[in-house]
Image (cartoon, rainbow, N blue to C red):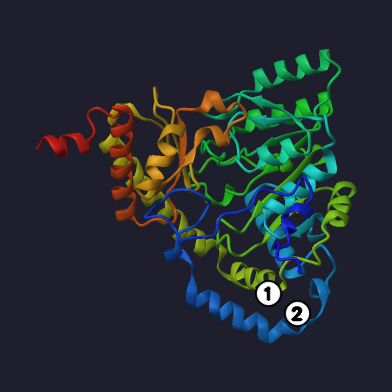
Amino acid sequence: MNDKAFDMAGLLAASAPAPAARFGGFADYYFIGGNGDPEQVPLDALAQAAADVIRRDGDRLAIYNLGQGPQGYLPLREFLTGKLNGKRGMSVTAEDILILSGSNQGLNIVFGLFIEPGDTVLVEEYSYGAIFPRLKALGANVVGVPLDADGIDVDTLESILDDLKAKGITPKFLYTIPTIQNPTGSVLPLGRRQSIAGLARQYGFVIFEDECYADLAWVSDVPPAIYALAPDVTVHIGSFSKTLGPALRVGYAVAEWPLLSRMTAAKSDGGTGGLDQMVAAEYFTQYFDAHMASLKPALQTKLTTMVNALEREFGTAAELYVPKGGIFLWLKIPGVDVRTLTEPAAKAGILFNAGPDWACNGEAAQSHLRLCFAMPSHETIEQGVAAFARICFEQTGIPARSANVAREKA
């Protein structure tokens, strides 16, 4: 009899991911991830929408894709047609839209369709952290594009493109989050969007536009989506994760049919959750504007709480990039490598996103970090920022004049 335990792990592919840690619950001060505000989930209206749509269309759950084909539930695509045309300046029909199992699926599909090992892609110098390991795994050469307070620096982008052209390199695409950029919270002006569209045509690359946060802009002068300006060179993705909730795994892609047909073919999951699509369509068709009119001010007040807490605790020791919407605050603490704070902060129940994980050049972002303000309460935000400032001071001597130090001296 062989008493040796069977080593299943020894049979795994070399490319298998490292094991995940077991979920042990949320930390006391959980400022990571893209969670929303639990108090803003419209429980009663959502329950009524679910009951209504199940009674009317629930028999469709017996059929893959609700019997309406792989592009997704038609009432949801029709709602999106109205929203995208009316609020993002597009001119699309339901046939131009593919429903996704979260916009992350859109990232995986587009990356998989375009990238082969050795290909070059352009990415904003600070961007969604989850894309970097994916691009690395695909063997892509990532070139960072500098940002300023308004987003992509178009002149520098053109210089980068000229340099690449001189080397015989045409990038496959530019991945951009132009409207409420993640993590900086900026909004790319109309003129720059038009210039980027012109560069895409001139240099022969695709614009991969991610507008997951566009609905959460609270400034009034948001330009049309880049897709609205240049659908021939753009693929657009969006999500309901930030407007209703990330546990509702529903996103969408918009593209002209030659590309959308490839994306549809690559979406091999048997269809996005039918009930999720049905409920989202039923609720948002009736209440989208009212929902956003409630959600955006609630998020903005939480941002104000976080900004006030950081200014109180850090003073001039922290540089804040106050966003124009969304759920994240990007900041810099000059002279501090925030990676040295990760472990002591975690031991104190504080989790934050270190800047290097959200940057093309990690070392250049060592003093940056991202904080999510949507899920924690106002009280938790204030307490968590104070606790983080205390950890930062204990580890680095910064901030030297925070409210923590003043309290201790008193």
Q: Secondary structure at mark 2?
A: helix
Residue 238 horizontal/vertical position (percent): 66, 51
Q: Quadrant of the N terminus?
A: bottom right
The three-letter amino acid code for the residue at tag 2 is: Leu
User: For this rendering, which residue is in front, 267 or 234?
Assistant: 267
User: For this rendering, which residue is in front, 388 or 250?
Assistant: 388
Q: Which residue is mark 2?
A: 61
Q: Which residue is mark 1?
A: 275
Residue 279 horizontal/vertical position (percent): 63, 73
Looking at the image, is mark 1 or mark 2 earlier in the sequence? 2
User: For this rendering, which residue is in front, 312 or 82?
Assistant: 312
Q: Which residue occupies 88% across, 50% down?
A: 262
Q: Which residue occupies 67% across, 39% down?
A: 133
Q: Residue 397, relative to residue 107: is it above or below? A: above
The three-letter amino acid code for the residue at tag 1 is: Leu
CA gap, disc 1 to disc 2? 7 Å
Residue 260 horizontal/vertical position (percent): 84, 51
